Image (cartoon, helix red, strand yellow):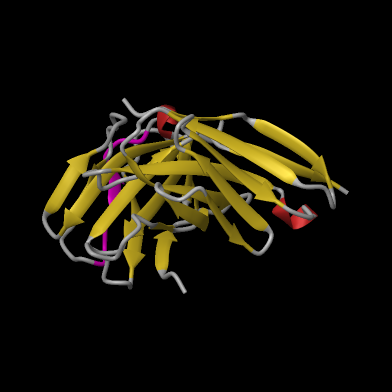
Amino acid sequence: GEDVEQSLFLSVREGDSSVINCTYTDSSSTYLYWYKQEPGAGLQLLTYIFSNMDMKQDQRLTVLLNKKDKHLSLRIADTQTGDSAIYFCAESLTGANNLFFGTGTRLTVIP
Amino acid sequence: EADIYQTPRYLVIGTGKKITLECSQTMGHDKMYWYQQDPGMELHLIHYSYGVNSTEKGDLSSESTVSRIRTEHFPLTLESARPSHTSQYLCASRANRGSGANVLTFGAGSRLTVL
């Protein structure tokens, strides 16, 4: 089955860059996504990338996709305390109607 | 602005009670989903629906049931709650076919505690 993996925890200092990594196994991914979940809340879409793209930038967020290695990363520049949350990567597959989520990475920003 | 609502946000009940978690969306989305989220964060798909009168079981077996009588409404029911049902339940919906990326919009979640 589909397997999407992330490291569980990441701590960074305020103002530094954060890089959250994700690996997936299914090469038929069509889109890959990053969602953010704040405490007690649902998931909020941050950004997504089409599988034939290498990079997408949106303000402080940069998504890099290495399709050969099946590796996705999310870089947050100038990380702020408000960025503390759980970040999920997810993939959608050809013909599938739902998303497959990673385990989530809990980002802690230290003031 | 995404409009998908879940009620109740928090529920504490005793074992054996019947409960229904409500989910409504005003975006006209055909596809709706229920995910169960472990305390350790991982999300598991338990039910989904492609439209009215369509319901399917997800990847994780669940004792809950769902119904889809109206497009905007996708309630989840537990006939007899047990402590093992304690979890966060997240409802989501997806834009209809032809809208490109398979973007799911989530509700705020319902946190269920069964004593």
Answer left or right for B43 relative to B21.
right
> Quick check: can you spot residue B115?
no
Q: Is residue A18 magenta?
A: no
Q: Could you say where residue A98 lies in the image, as x and y percent from the top left?
A: 30, 46
- Marker count (numbered): 0
Residue located at (56% from left, 45% from top): A64
Residue located at (47% from left, 54% from top): A48
The segment highlighted magenta reads: B72-81
Quadrant for the N terminus of chain A, please: top left
Residue located at (26% from left, 63% from top): B73
Work out whether residue B36 or residue A90 is closer to the camera in this orientation and state it: A90
The picture quadrant where one finds residue A105 is top right
Q: Could you say where residue B74 lies in the image, as x and y percent from the top left?
A: 27, 57
The picture quadrant where one finds residue B83 is top left
Answer left or right for B74 relative to A40.
left
Work out whether residue A60 or residue A34 is closer to the camera in this orientation and state it: A60
Q: Could you say where residue A84 lies in the image, as x and y percent from the top left?
A: 71, 49
The picture quadrant where one finds residue A67 is top left
Answer left or right for A98 relative to A19.
left
> Quick check: can you spot residue B28?
yes
Q: Is residue B70 above or below residue A83?
A: below
**Magenta part, dominant SS:** loop
Residue at the top extreme, as displayed: A1
Residue located at (28% from left, 46% from top): B77
Residue at the left extreme, as displayed: B53
Answer left or right for A42 relative to B99.
right
Q: Could you say where residue B23 lies in the image, as x and y percent from the top left?
A: 35, 59
